[in-house]
Amino acid sequence: MTRRLFPHGPLSAGQLVTLGGIALITIGTFLLKTPWATTPGKSLSFLDALFTATSAVTVTGLIVADTEKDFTLFGQIVILTLIQLGGLGYAMLATIMLIAVGQRIGLRNRMMVAEALSSLDLAGSIRFVKTILIITFTFEGLGASILAARFSQEMPLLEACWHGIFHAVSAFNNAGFSTFSQNLIPYRDDVLVNVSISLLFVLGGIGFIVFRDLLSYYRKERYRIQTHTRLALLVSVSLWVIGTIGFYLLEMHSPATLRSQTPAAGAMVAVFHSGAARTAGFNTLDLSLLRPSTLYMLILLMIIGGSPGGTAGGIKTTTFGIVCLSVWAVFRKRLDVEFHYRRMPLHLVLQALAIMFLAIGAVTTLTFFLALIENKPFLALMFEVASALGTVGFSVGNGGVLSLSAILTDFGKIIILSSMFLGRFGPLLVGLVSLTPPVRMLYRFPQAKVAIG
């Protein structure tokens, strides 16, 4: 029977992870379609339920229904569960269940964990999963406690606790979903909320591989920080600083955004959105008020995303870093791509270039088809596509509290829905190349000379 369903042999670990995501989306769609998930008088269409479930599992955050007013507590719990499972990864969930029943973890399951979390090697995958669980629930618990204490100043304690839990989980998983209709706009000047949410999405997006490496270095288990960690941290910090400066300079004279703010308040808005653009998706400002140049800068940040092995999306910071190092090597007339006294393998460089090319191609192609069927501003459509592919959740909006996707045609919603799924699982499937050594041919063709530039 298995051979008839899959004539080319058993599914790879990457395909199993993707199928797990599809299964979660399917279950979530049907749960959100139940009458218990929506408030009285509100009924989701099948496409809107599918869109919401996909957005939650892919931890994107684009919404076509108001999470606060259109969903009951049950519906919000369904969304939060999909976010948590989608953020941590289906493969890790399967491994957790195996640990719980005391079964041995086979090589196939270890490969699933390694692929889902972009682990650098297979050794110690199960210990790695346990570490991730401790890190995840510790940070989410601390974040929920701080946010609940803050929200309790404005609402009953139980309600504040729920909002705190939801936002902590959503932030750490870089989902961008909010149980407030206006997202975090009412808390634009609240330092505690801004700092708490920012720390959560940064810690979730930096990658668990970085956590493991820094922890090993701190414990003296290794005496050198890995190249991956150095590159991920360098690119992440650089992008955040450059994005913050760019956002502030572009918006400081805009009367609709930062001109009316004090320098300190404006700087906090810039810092928050520069970090959130790399897949967190929370906003403390109406993004439809931003200048076109600012939106374009955010598109670039959304495409890059966070680091491998974390909850963030995008092409990943290390991919972007390797591409930049490749360009630098060309200018230096070096054959090797080097970083901090290490040489990048050729197949890794080619993989990074391929992912970058595919991402740019996906944004342009999907934007073209969306512009073909939707009568909306081109930049707004490109912004929505980049947000979906980067699994960010930023949107210029529908004129209300929903994403632009809410007023797209059914075909437009399907394009955005497909973009979210492609953005979450596409880099994973392309990244499978790095888990296998490059094929070495027994022969090589003569070199050719081709004029470029």
Image (cartoon, rainbow, N blue to C red):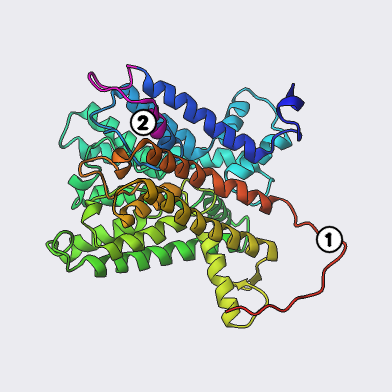
Query: Quick one: quadrant of the N terminus?
Result: top right
Q: Is 155 on the left or on the right of 236, as rendered?
A: left
The amino acid pointed to by label 2 is: Asp
Query: Quick one: quadrant of the C terminus?
Result: bottom right
The amino acid pointed to by label 1 is: Met
Q: Can residue 451 be seen in this view?
A: yes
Crowd tier of the residue under label 2, counting other residues whose Cα lies within 10 Å: few below 14, some 14–19, many 20 or above = many
Q: State yes or no: residue 46 in magenta.
A: yes
Q: Residue 356: x, y in percent?
A: 54, 60
Give the distance between the C-alpha atoms of the residues marked 1 and 2, in whole angstroms: 49 Å
The residue pinned by badge 1 equals 441
Total residue callouts: 2
> Is 132 located above or below residue 67 in the figure?
below
| Magenta region, main secondary structure | loop
Instruction: Name the residue located 45 percent from the left edge and 43 percent from the top edge.
Output: 420
User: Based on the displayed image, in which of its 4 quarters is residue 257 positioned?
Assistant: bottom left
In front of the other: 237 or 225: 237
Q: Is 411 on the left or on the right of 286, as rendered?
A: right
Tag 1 secondary structure: loop
| Label placed on residue 48 | 2
Q: State yes or no: residue 298 in magenta.
A: no
Q: Is 275 on the left or on the right of 325, as rendered?
A: left
Q: Which residue lies furthest to the top in this view?
A: 35
Q: Which is nearer the N-term, disc 1 or disc 2? A: 2
User: Based on the displayed image, in which of its 4 quarters is residue 330 positioned?
Assistant: bottom right
Q: Residue 409: x, y in percent?
A: 34, 38
Q: Residue 116: x, y in percent?
A: 58, 42
Q: Residue 140: x, y in percent?
A: 39, 39
Q: What stretch is highlighted in magenta?
A: 35-52
